Image (tube, rainbow, N blue to C red):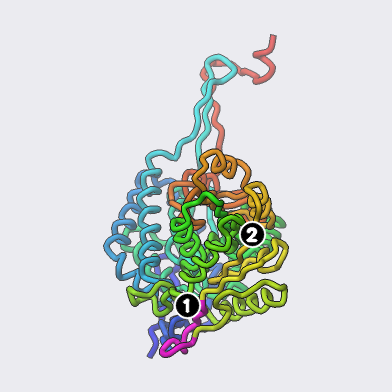
């Protein structure tokens, strides 16, 4: 009998009102049923939002340092349970243990960083233009926040959103991806143990079309924070715009690594392989395009192919595995479809391009690391987000052309350049259109204390992580205190 998990609403673990459930399977072995989860609908979402709205009245009055102490305790519990959670997460979404340990560590880092901000949450003081008058600005909470998160970082991304929202004094309803509901359950068990009051954070499972849409449309949700595909993000932005609801979007990427003719090729190889095939290419920051200077193109391409063909594919719970499965059958079919598109467009397949179903891995969603050469910048495989172990190689003649090719997509999340020329590196930092740029590093590996997000169709201008996340989850309030004992009119009384 499969274990039945529940949603978390108003401090209680509850089933969906409809009684319906959905199955959660291990992508490395679809015969492995992790459990059954509530298929929440609009009624469940409404109950969660009402609980959050009621809890907001008291939670917003809890001093921010006290809110931070609860988050710190959550970080301590995450640290204590790190290995357990990492193993459960690998079973649930497939990436290797090294990476799920890193995913949990992001949650720990975010908890500690956010807890510290509880004694900061800085506003600004400024001189008034009038005598005997004090002026300042402070942050105040927004209200109920709806959080919709993806499956590829099932601990890190929810904590990136949830912890800052809670610290600001907001209450939340989290709707995690259908592919990774178990990790969300673990997170809420930790919040409950850390002492978070009932109703402050609520968890609803279910499909985006039902639970997610109901959360976006709910009139009492004041802010919606979404990480996922650009197509879904557009729909959410339109709905929020109709209701003048604040919305933060972090969406797609078509990230590129430039390798110049003066680069350390061994170092660049490590970055390219890690960036393209880490998390089986299922990161919004994954290296999807490899832009190579013609001077090193032939040698470096051979190095990439040789290394890609040696990647050990298998169950992420095996410490020797280097790349796990794709998240589900639809994801694998999408990647395989792009391999066919690449061939049709005239690109040259160097390795991969096929489903991996060898031996005991026949029941998983595995795909071979894929590398295409002779890719033109306008090809679909060089323009569209594939979200799999798929690398397109583009040759350029100069640094200027490399930057032009890198910028020539509708996305602008992460980017990388390998070069020993410090002047060229700084020009890249200036000219590359992306929210993140690495010099002599892979396109993946963001740290929680710096802003995270991108330009163009990657998002709508907000930045999670770092201090900028507090601009998403709080409102600014300006305060004036006049102790002159008389009415003073700004812009009037101080003008002679």
Secondary element at tag 1: loop
The residue indicated by pointer 2 is 395
The answer, for residue 176, to whether it is visible in the render is no
In the depicted view, which residue is nearer to us: 70 or 93? Answer: 93
344, 224: nearer the viewer: 344
Screen quadrant of the N terminus: bottom left
In the image, residue 343 above or below residue 124: below
Q: Which residues are magenta?
A: 357-368
Name the residue rendered at 48%, 56% in the picture: 265
- Residue 430: name its quadrant: top right
For residue 236, above or below residue 111: below
Residue pointed to by mark 1? 325
Residue visible at 43% across and 72% down in the picture: 95
* Viewer-closest of 195 and 82: 82
Q: Say which residue appears at 66% left-offset and 47% top-offset.
A: 400
**Where residue 77 sits in the image (x, y, percent)?**
29, 61
Q: Residues within 10 Å of mark 2 (few under 14, many from 20)?
A: many
Q: Is residue 366 magenta?
A: yes
- Pinpoint residue 398: horizontal percent, then vertical percent: 64, 49
Label 2 sits on a secondary structure element that is strand
Q: Position of residue 70 (x, y in %)?
A: 34, 53
- In this rendering, would 216 be left or right of 369? right
Q: Is residue 315 in view from this perspective?
A: yes
* Quadrant of the image containing the C terminus: top right
Q: Is residue 7 found inside the magenta-colored segment of the image?
A: no
Q: Is residue 155 left or right of residue 43?
A: left
């Amino acid at each position: 009998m499969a274990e039945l998990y529940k949603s978390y609403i108003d401090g209680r673990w509850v089933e969906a009102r409809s009684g319906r459930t959905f199955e959660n399977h291990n992508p490395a072995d679809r015969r492995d049923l992790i459990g059954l989860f509530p298929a929440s609908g609009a009624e469940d979402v409404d109950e969660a939002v009402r609980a959050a709205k009621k809890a907001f009245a008291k939670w917003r009055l809890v001093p921010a340092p006290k809110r931070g102490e609860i988050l710190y305790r959550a970080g301590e519990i995450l640290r204590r349970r790190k290995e357990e959670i990492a193993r459960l997460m690998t079973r649930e979404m497939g990436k290797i243990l090294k990476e799920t340990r890193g995913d949990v560590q992001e949650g720990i880092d975010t908890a500690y960083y956010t807890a510290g901000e509880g004694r900061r949450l800085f506003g600004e003081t400024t001189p008034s233009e009038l005598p005997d008058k004090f002026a300042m600005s402070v942050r105040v909470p927004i209200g109920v926040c709806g959080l919709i998160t993806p499956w590829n970082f099932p601990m890190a991304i929810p904590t990136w959103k949830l912890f800052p929202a809670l610290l600001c004094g907001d209450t939340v309803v989290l709707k995690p991806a259908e592919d990774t509901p178990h990790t969300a359950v673990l997170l809420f068990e930790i919040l409950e143990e850390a002492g978070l009051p009932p109703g402050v954070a609520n968890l609803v499972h279910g499909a985006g079309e039902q639970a997610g849409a109901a959360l976006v449309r709910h009139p009492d949700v004041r802010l919606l924070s979404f990480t996922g595909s650009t197509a879904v993000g557009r729909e959410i932005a339109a709905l929020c715009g109709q209701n003048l609801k604040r919305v933060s979007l972090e969406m797609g990427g078509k990230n590129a690594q430039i390798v110049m003719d003066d680069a350390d090729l061994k170092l660049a190889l490590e970055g390219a392989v890690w960036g393209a095939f880490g998390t089986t290419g299922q990161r919004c920051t994954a290296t999807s395009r490899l832009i190579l200077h013609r001077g090193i193109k032939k040698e470096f391409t051979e190095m990439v192919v040789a290394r890609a063909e040696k990647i050990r594919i298998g169950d992420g719970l095996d410490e020797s595995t280097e790349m796990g499965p794709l998240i589900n059958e639809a994801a694998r079919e999408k990647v395989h479809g792009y391999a066919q598109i690449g061939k049709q467009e005239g690109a040259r397949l160097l390795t991969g391009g096929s489903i991996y179903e060898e031996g005991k891995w026949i029941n998983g969603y595995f795909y071979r690391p894929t590398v295409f050469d002779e890719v033109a910048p306008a090809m679909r495989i060089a323009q569209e987000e594939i979200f799999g172990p798929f690398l397109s190689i583009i040759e350029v003649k100069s640094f200027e052309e490399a930057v032009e090719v890198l910028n020539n997509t509708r996305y602008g999340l992460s980017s990388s350049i390998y070069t020993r020329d410090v002047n060229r590196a700084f020009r890249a930092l200036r000219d590359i259109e992306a929210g993140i740029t690495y010099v002599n590093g892979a396109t993946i590996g963001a740290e929680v204390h710096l802003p995270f997000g991108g330009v163009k169709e990657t998002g709508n201008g907000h930045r999670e992580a770092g201090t900028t996340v507090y601009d998403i989850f709080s409102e600014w309030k300006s305060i004036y205190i006049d102790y002159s004992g008389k009415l003073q009119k700004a812009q009037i009384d101080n003008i002679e």
